[in-house]
Image (cartoon, helix red, strand yellow):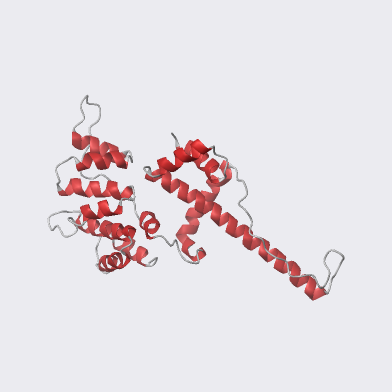
Amino acid sequence: MNKETQQERIDRYLLGRAEREERLELEEEVTRNAALSEQLAETELALAAIELAEDRALKARLQGLEAKLVATGTATADTPATAPAPKVVRMKPRAKSRRNLFAIAATLLLLLAVGWWALQPKGMGDPGQLAMASFEPYDNIAYQIERGGTEVEPAAAAFIAYEEKDYATAATAFAALPATAVNKFYLGQSELAQGNFAAAAAQFRDLHNADEFNLAQESAYFLALAHLGEGKIEAARKALEVIAGEDGHPMQDKAQTLLTKL
């Protein structure tokens, strides 16, 4: 299913137009499809941004009208001088076209870049959401996939599923492979991509201090994300502070950015 079709499903779901079976199907699929979950979250946040902007614009217009009436002393049968101050009623999200939602999603990404957090009185409030928002699956740099053969080796099958973002299948495949550092790293990636924080932490915990593993530093960052998703805020913060303070660390910038959100 292409991304445009997925967006149509998400739009119907969020706007209350989807049938019950379609809603249940999407909700079930979101639990195992990280890309779809991210697309749903972005669109939902876009709608929230629109609602917030509409509320603020309406409030500003009503306050401006009230100030004008007070300043001029204008009163009519419809707007007597003794009329109470206009009351702002929270607006329900308007039905938006699919095309508008695509544009809004793009705008939302810009808002995120310049400080979406400032619009949220209490931040995201969910450490798991923050962990996932800060996570990007690591590229496959360990296994060169040669396609076209009639038989696929278990390791190739694992990395093929991983590159196709089928993380549930990838996790199962990696778990069946020998527990090498590389396989554990990509198993941890596959678990983290699904939001399985404890399972991911179990993999990265053994890797971040492995002296001879060339992705040990990256593992430390992903372990911090897993701890954050588990709700172990202080453990995550301490690990990120170590990474952020280590010049030359490949994940230093990401750690510094994430610390500003904790």
* Count of all numbered marks drawn on residues in the image: 0
Q: Is residue 86 left or right of residue 74?
A: left
Q: Is residue 33 left or right of residue 79?
A: left
Pick the quarter of the image with the N terminus. Answer: top left
Asked if 200 appears above or below 3 in the picture, the reply is: below
Image coords of residue 160 (percent x, y): 27, 36
Give the residue at the far right of this rendering. 77
Give the residue at the far left of this rendering. 212
What residue do we see at 23% from left, 45% from top? 141
Q: Is residue 248 left or right of residue 165?
A: left
What residue do we see at 84% from left, 63% from top? 78
Give the residue at the far top of this rendering. 150
Q: Does residue 254 appear in the picture of this structure?
A: yes
Q: Is residue 193 left or right of residue 36?
A: left
Q: Quadrant of residue 168?
A: top left
Image coords of residue 9 (percent x, y): 50, 39
What residue do we see at 52% from left, 43% from top? 13
Image coords of residue 21 (percent x, y): 49, 36
Pick the quarter of the image with the C terminus. Answer: bottom left
Asked if 75 appears above or below 130 in the picture, the reply is: below
Image coords of residue 158 (percent x, y): 24, 38
What residue do we see at 50% from left, 58% from top? 111
Q: Does residue 138 appear in the picture of this structure?
A: no
